[in-house]
Image (cartoon, grey):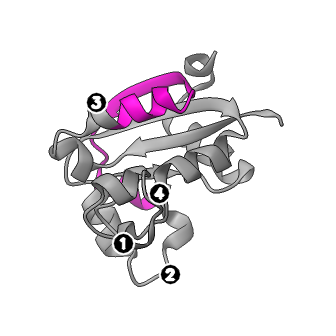
């Protein structure tokens, strides 16, 4: 398997509930290397740009409003097969359908308030990482 990088976000709901440390602990336990990490509050416009691929979906306005309500933690994770590995660590988008032991099953409250985001493909990861981090931050 190849070493990959993926974008991970600890969403505003999890930051607000004080779950950042627990989620970071799970990231370390899963043997990811954190390449870069920062806390920031997205503007509505930044959230709309980040989620532009979903612009025509009915949840777009609600999602971008939610993601701009308060601070989130954005980071780049690295590991073998990082994209799939992070998605497995997070669990299904709907916490009620996520596997036991996953972040979303254990900590998520709803489909929207599911604590984390992760890239779903190499092309998505490249876009998402570049959205938040400059090349010099990724060395």
In the picture of the structure, the residue carrying the numbered disc 3 is: 21
**In terms of sequence position, does the residue under pointer 2 or pointer 1 come before the other?**
2
Q: Is residue 98 above or below residue 104?
A: below
Instruction: From the image, tell me which residue sits under label 4.
Output: 49
Which is closer to the viewer, label 3 or label 4?
A: 3
Q: Position of residue 133 (x, y in %)?
A: 53, 31
The residue at the point 43 percent across, 58 percent down is 100
Identify the mark at residue 96; answer none if there is no mark.
Answer: 1
- Residue named by callout 2: 56
Q: Mark 2 vs mark 3: which is more N-terminal?
A: 3
Q: Nearer the viewer, residue 76 or 107?
A: 107
Magenta segment range?
23-49
* Image position of 3 with respect to 50: above or below: above
Asked whether residue 107 is drawn in magenta, I would say: no
Along the polypeptide, which appears first: circle 3 or circle 4? 3
Q: Residue 94 appears in which quarter of the rendering?
A: bottom left
Q: CA distance from mark 2 to mark 1?
A: 26 Å
Point out the frontmost of discs 2 and 3: 3
- For disc 1, the neighbor class at 10 Å (few under 14, some 14 to 19, many from 20) is some
Tell me residue 138's x, y (percent). 60, 21
Name which of mark 4 and mark 1 comes first in the sequence. 4
């Amino acid at each position: 398997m190849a070493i990959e990088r993926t974008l991970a976000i600890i969403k505003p709901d999890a930051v607000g509930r004080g779950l950042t440390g627990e989620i970071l602990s799970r990231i370390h336990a899963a043997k990811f290397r954190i390449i870069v990490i920062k806390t920031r509050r997205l503007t509505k416009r930044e959230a709309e740009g980040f989620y532009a691929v979903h612009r025509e979906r009915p949840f777009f306005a609600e999602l971008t409003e939610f993601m701009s309500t308060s601070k989130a933690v954005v980071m780049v994770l690295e590991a073998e097969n990082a994209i799939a590995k992070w998605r497995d660590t997070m669990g299904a988008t709907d916490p009620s359908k996520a596997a036991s032991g996953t972040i979303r099953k254990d900590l998520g409250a709803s489909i929207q308030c599911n604590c984390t985001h992760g890239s779903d493909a190499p092309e998505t990861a490249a876009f998402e990482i570049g959205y938040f981090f400059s090349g010099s931050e990724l060395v």
